[in-house]
Amino acid sequence: MEAINSWLIEFVPLNETWRQIIIAVVIFFLFLALRGLFARVIFRLLLGLTRRTKTDIDDRIIPVLENPLKTLILVVGTYLALSYLPLGPGPDLVVNRLYRSFIIAIAAWVLYNVSGRKPFQDMYDKFNIDPALADFLAKALRFLIVALALLMVADVWGYPVTGLLTGLGLGGLAVALAAQDAVSNIFGGIVILLDKPFSVGDWIYTPSVEGTVEEISFRSTKIRTFAQALITMPNSKIANEPITNWTRMGKRRIKFNLGVTYSTPREKLRRCIDRIRELLQAHPGIHKETIFVTFDEFGESSLRIFLYFFTKTTVWAEYLEVKEDVNFKIMEILEQEGVSLALPSRSVYIESR
């Protein structure tokens, strides 16, 4: 800059103020033209450092620094250009405060971009953190970054930050009291995401609703019922209800009574029970751990065979297919043995005189 000033003094007949203005403009456009080059050089240095590390987190962080870095170079160039001008004490103070405010804003911009979920996705996957919880943590951190940046900028411009914090505290208390339901829903969402009683896609049952979970947010949970209606449940309510997660069954139960007529001979009844038990033990869709087929009781109009077993699948459609196949094969056994199913009936005897 001194060389440019000397050249202007020697060859351009201008006063000191105009020379300073020209030099300030040169400084500004020099930084504007070379900011891309400066950014590339700094990026190469940073990439060289990140290649030596074992983690991939820094490799994801570096790309989000590009735009803030270019802006920082331009802000520094603008500050240097304005500093070269004879503005006086008052304007110099304003320029200095603007420069510090922009530096704080750029730092907050970098932290805001870095605090997103994407750079730390591997860490969230490693610790099995729910995506909704990860999004909430990222949003909360970003809100804190913006709030701190605004407070720091207010302090730079001489505003009483302590009084502002006190006012925000009282205002926050009033808002919290007025939004108790919203706060309870948020805490209910945190409980659901931490305890994980269900996930998106699970079939759940509560005293209030039954269906498939479509979305979990921090305010509510959306459940698609089997009638295809979409129900939005407040998290504070669903978190305090007993939840049955049918999707997480290891196997699915089938339980019923089979009634045959009282005219069925004892040997035929025993043979039917043995054959049905063998059928279930050999069926590829039936879980072998628990199978009960027993002559249970003498009913009002039938001899009752009790069947209790489980399918290997928990998927509703596949469960129905296995159950249907078993029912047809039981009918085939009864037909082969010549045993008839009993219908509910009642005999009425009329006494004649």
Image (cartoon, helix red, strand yellow):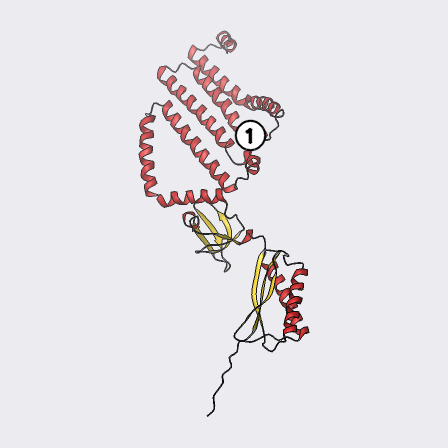
* Residue 99 against residue 15 in the figure, above or below: below
Which class describes the residues within 10 Å of circle 1: few (<14), some (14-19), or many (20+)? many
- The residue that disc 1 covers is 61
- The quarter of the picture where residue 17 lies is top left
Tell me residue 344's x, y (percent).
53, 76
* Residue 305 against residue 78 in the figure, above or below: below
In the displayed image of the protein, which residue is found farthest to the bottom?
Answer: 353
Quick check: can you spot residue 78? Answer: yes
Side of 245 relative to 323 (left or right): left
Tell me residue 291's x, y (percent).
61, 60
Of 67 and 113, which appears nearest the observer?
Answer: 113
**Total marks in image:** 1
Q: Secondary structure at mark 1?
A: helix
Residue shown at the point (60%, 66%) measured from the top left: 294
Tell me residue 164's x, y (percent).
32, 29
- The quarter of the picture where residue 269 lies is bottom right
Of 85 and 271, which appears nearest the observer?
Answer: 271
Quick check: can you spot residue 15? Answer: no
Of 226 and 38, which appears nearest the observer?
Answer: 226
Tell me residue 120's x, y (percent).
55, 34
Residue type pointed to by label 1? Ile
Residue shown at the point (55%, 51%) measured from the top left: 248
* Residue 320 against residue 344 in the figure, above or below: above
Side of 189 relative to 56 (left or right): left
